[in-house]
Amino acid sequence: MDLASSAKNLSELCTFRVGGAIKRFYQSTDTADLTAAVALADRSKVPLLFLGGGSNTLPRDEGFDGMVIKDARNSVVVVTDPEDLTISWRDSCHPDNLPNPNSIGANSAIVRADAGVMWDDLVKYAVSQGFSGIEALSGIPGTVGAAPVQNIGAYGAEIGDVIIGLTAWDRVRSKICYLARRDMAFGYRDSILKRSRVALGGATGRWIVLGVDLELQRSTESSPVAYSQLAAALGVELGERAPLEAVRAAVLELRRGKGMVLDAADHDTWSAGSFFTNPIVPADSPILRGLPAEAPRWEVARPRSYEEIMAAMMPSVWRKNSGISGENGSAGGSVGETGSAGLERETGLKSRSSAGMASAAEPHCSEDDGRLTATDDCPTEIVGSAKGAVDAGSAKDVAVKLSAAWLIEHSGVPKGFALPESGAGVSTKHVLALTNRGGASAAEIRALADYVVSRVRETFEVELVPEPVIL
Ligand SMILES: Cc1cc2nc3c(=O)[nH]c(=O)nc-3n(C[C@H](O)[C@H](O)[C@H](O)COP(=O)(O)OP(=O)(O)OC[C@H]3O[C@@H](n4cnc5c(N)ncnc54)[C@H](O)[C@@H]3O)c2cc1C
């Protein structure tokens, strides 16, 4: 295999439309070729960027001094024979965690999609077939393979809600294995796949997603609408259903109004969507006492460290040998443990459950791209879904989520803000999105990100965490 098949510019492959040349680029429609290319890059100690739609990646002007691989496979099948589904489970990463075939409902449609399929094409297909479950995730850019990496979410839904599992190439063990939903420790814009990238310190994580299995419902009605702005647009109550096509159309319209549907003519969409996640701080952090009372906040489960997740979820054979040749094996960080006493007094939070944990029953409040912000359905508080990423049952596992959008706006950075003579700017529609106004460099986008981080740090002592992968 020729790793130097052709060179491209990252600006052509990433939605920020910035970034310099790629040294080696490889794209294939063949699974064996893709895994061989990844294995070859790893054996050759060449830095690897397995790229999807480039919609969550901020490149460098200097380019990428390594191997960029893209999956061009594009098949979607409806699995009708359960044997076809369970065959891949024989390669399970964690045999004890296998999905229970009996839990798959009679009304379910099992959809298996290649990682290279564009996510919104899959949503469109599902809606056209009368399969409900992902219609609220309409319009999110990027590929199916990247979708579970940060557990994409919008308008009250997350891919983690409907995923059965995925087939992945394990770069540490150099083999294909099946990760069931329970293996993936899904949380708010979080999964073991994402954590493994942070832990390894490279551009791409330990598992290369090759295909994803979703359990959707055979229904022309949507899942219960879980976001008030969407419910209002549809003229239904929260928790009611609406026709699939209507939900997709309404979500796309709402997203367009916020610059959250890719559009070459709209510079507000030359972005990575929201640039910052909502910060999560320990529940006993003094930062919380310093925040104005009106600052939106909500208690959530404490995200676990990569090591905790691996220890809890992966059998020892999959934990061994956690380094990939050529990349450093340092551990990822974690939000510190929290004190339990006087949570309400310390933080001003309302405890909502006896265990004080985020749960699947919580409403999902949304950012302007359908994720988290203070909105009319969540006037002053934020609720996240930390499902799967937490140890249930103890108050020391409680943390507090803050609204990045609120913090940015109240630190004096308005929509449309730009640094002098910079081609980068905050979206005119959505304060969480940093954008390329036309001729920006990657360095200008980074400088804007650094400025926003420093404004929030100086004003509130809160450290914002970027959502995109910064190369
Ligand atoms: C306008 C706009 C709106 C957005 N709105 C939302 C939103 O509402 N909700 C939301 O959650 N996100 C949103 N995003 C962010 C982004 O679309 C998602 O994170 C998406 O899943 C990224 O997919 P991608 O293929 O473009 O990933 P890329 O940017 O190509 O890659 C991101 C990371 O995933 C890794 N990766 C890619 N493919 C694979 C694979 N097959 N296996 C393993 N790792 C892989 C890459 O190595 C990299 O580390 C938005 C982005 C934009 C530009």
Image: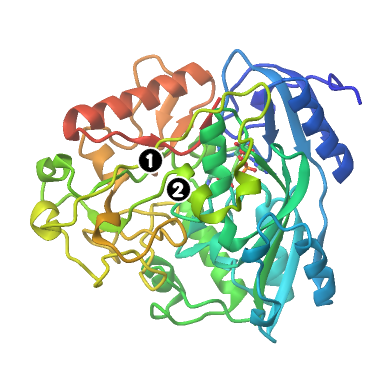
Say whether mark 1 is within 8 Å of ligand 1. Answer: no
The residue under label 2 is 308
In the rendered image, the vertical position of residue 392 relative to residue 116, given as above or below: below
In the rendered image, the vertical position of residue 318 relative to residue 112, given as above or below: above
Q: Residue 252's quadrant in the figure?
A: bottom right
Q: Residue 32's quadrant in the figure?
A: top right
Q: Which amino acid does label 1 sit on?
A: Ser
Residue 334 numbered mark, or none:
1
Q: Is residue 358 left or right of residue 455?
A: right
Describe the element under mark 1 as helix, strand or loop: loop
What residue is shown at x 46% (from left), y 55% (from top)?
187
Q: Are marks 1 and 2 in contact (CB under 8 Å)?
A: yes
Q: Residue 30's quadrant in the figure?
A: top right
| Mark 1 Cα-neighbour bin, 10 Å: few <14, some 14–19, many ≥20 | few
Q: Which of 152 and 43 is in front in this view?
A: 43
**Quadrant of the frame with the N terminus:** top right
What residue is shown at x 66% (from left), y 71% (from top)?
215
Q: What residue type is labelled 2?
A: Glu
